[in-house]
């Protein structure tokens, strides 16, 4: 082989090598999305906003925006059938991951605060108004009814429910809807307080609520069975989510399945959260994610989340008109009707302590918070029934 042939051979191989690198295929969109992923990771580490979610999602966004050469036979990307990431993404596309997360949530949730004061379930119901307001707005903006239903559920601030519903109604928008839902769940401490302060007076913010009553064990055991029957008889399409939620809670409260309950609320939910966050993040490839529809989904999502907070606080104030003195509700817990557990309940507690350092609202807020989880699942079932 003479030098000319050797030079041509090396040049050809080098050219092919460069063509396979991400440097030659990167676009401004890829760089922008990588910056978004870094921003999520920064929020998780420096602000500690939902780090268990934002770090896998942020890293997944970076993975999904490493540009691959076109027209290759490699099966690497998340949308390439048979790739490892595509196999993991099946849990998102099929709606498998959300029920497993609901099982873990049920195994770690104490419904005592709700059982102690059942009327606070109304706050969880009131907060779902944001979902239906977003549905109407989505239709006005030109989305199909099925797409509008999937977008609207962002207002419930429940990531798993949003993924489950979008996988059934609008799989083409799973990425933007999931990212929007989890983003707003993480940004609860930023989005909700201004709305809460705007709608309440100083006098209302220091209302003291009666301490929750002690709930007997038997009542805790009966609740998941009765809750399952009541909610799923009303809306059977909520069964995949609520069935797993109440099963997890029964495992916890029965006292005879500690191993199963511990697995559900620790190892299993952690594994599913990693896969879910990573694959949802990786699905946000720039050429698919950076569209006008995605931007509208984000705008509709934040609007519905604000409306949900607004309606929860306002409904708490309305309930006070019909409550006796000494049995009033502190309207600061109205924000926790959205199902961002336990972030929105913590916000209720933190804002309340700013105005009275001895007034602890957390347990009361958790009642409406867990009601919001149930409410958003029922709302998802309603949308699925009418739109699928």
Image (cartoon, rainbow, N blue to C red):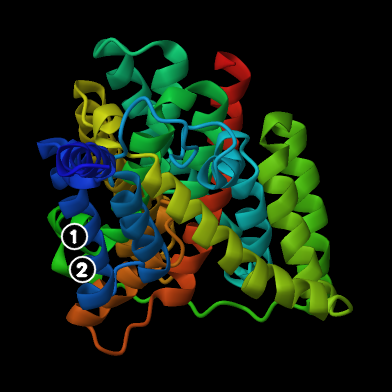
Q: Relative to residue 154, is residue 120 drawn left or right?
A: right
**Residue 208, horizontal then vertical, whole percent:** 36, 76
> What is the x, y in percent for residue 287?
25, 29
Judged left or right of residue 347, residue 380 is right
Q: Which residue is mark 1?
A: 39
Question: Where's residue 175, x and y in %?
Answer: 38, 37
Residue 90 in view here:
yes
Residue occupied by mark 2: 42
**Are dots 2 and 1 in contact, CB under 8 Å?**
yes
The C terminus appears in which quarter of the rendering? Answer: top right
* Residue at screen point 25% across, 60% down: 40
Q: Residue at x 43, y 45 (%)?
A: 280
In the rendered structure, the answer to whether residue 163 lies left or right of residue 183 reads: right
Label 1 SS? helix
**In the figure, residue 204 lies in which quadrant?**
bottom left
In which quadrant will I find the N terminus?
top left
């Amino acid at each position: 082989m003479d030098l000319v042939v050797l030079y041509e051979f090396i040049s050809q191989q080098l050219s092919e090598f460069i063509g396979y690198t991400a440097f030659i295929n990167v676009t401004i969109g890829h760089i922008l999305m990588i910056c978004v992923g870094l921003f999520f990771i920064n929020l998780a580490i420096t602000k500690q906003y939902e780090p268990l979610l934002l770090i896998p999602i942020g890293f997944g966004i970076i993975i999904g925006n490493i540009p691959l050469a076109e027209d290759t036979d490699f099966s690497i990307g998340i949308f390439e059938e048979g790739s490892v990431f595509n196999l993991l993404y099946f849990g998102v596309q099929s709606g498998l991951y959300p029920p497993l997360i609901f099982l873990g949530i049920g195994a770690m949730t104490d419904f005592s605060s709700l059982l102690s004061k059942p009327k606070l379930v109304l706050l969880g119901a009131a907060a779902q108004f944001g979902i239906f307001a977003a549905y109407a707005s989505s239709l006005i903006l030109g989305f199909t009814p099925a797409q509008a239903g999937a977008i609207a559920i962002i207002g419930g601030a429940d990531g798993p429910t949003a993924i489950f519903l979008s996988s059934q109604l609008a799989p083409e928008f799973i990425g933007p809807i999931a990212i929007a839902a989890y983003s707003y769940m993480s940004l609860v401490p930023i989005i909700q307080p201004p709305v809460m302060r705007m709608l309440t007076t100083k006098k209302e913010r220091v209302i003291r609520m009666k301490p929750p009553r002690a709930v007997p064990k038997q009542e805790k055991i009966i609740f998941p069975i009765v809750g399952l029957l009541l909610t799923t008889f009303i809306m059977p399409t909520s069964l995949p989510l609520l069935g797993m939620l109440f099963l997890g809670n029964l495992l916890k409260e029965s006292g005879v399945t500690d191993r199963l309950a511990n697995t559900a609320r620790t190892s299993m939910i952690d594994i599913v959260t990693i896969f879910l966050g990573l694959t949802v993040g990786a699905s946000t490839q720039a050429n698919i994610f950076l569209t006008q529809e995605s931007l509208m989904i984000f705008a509709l999502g934040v609007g519905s989340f604000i409306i949900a907070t607004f309606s929860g606080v306002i409904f708490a104030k309305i309930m006070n008109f019909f409550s006796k003195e000494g049995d009033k509700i502190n309207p600061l817990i109205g924000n926790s009707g959205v199902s961002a557990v336990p972030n929105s309940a913590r916000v209720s507690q933190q804002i309340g302590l700013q105005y009275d350092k001895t007034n602890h609202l957390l347990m009361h807020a958790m009642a409406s918070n867990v009601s919001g989880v149930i409410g958003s699942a029922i709302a998802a079932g309603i949308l699925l029934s009418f739109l699928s």
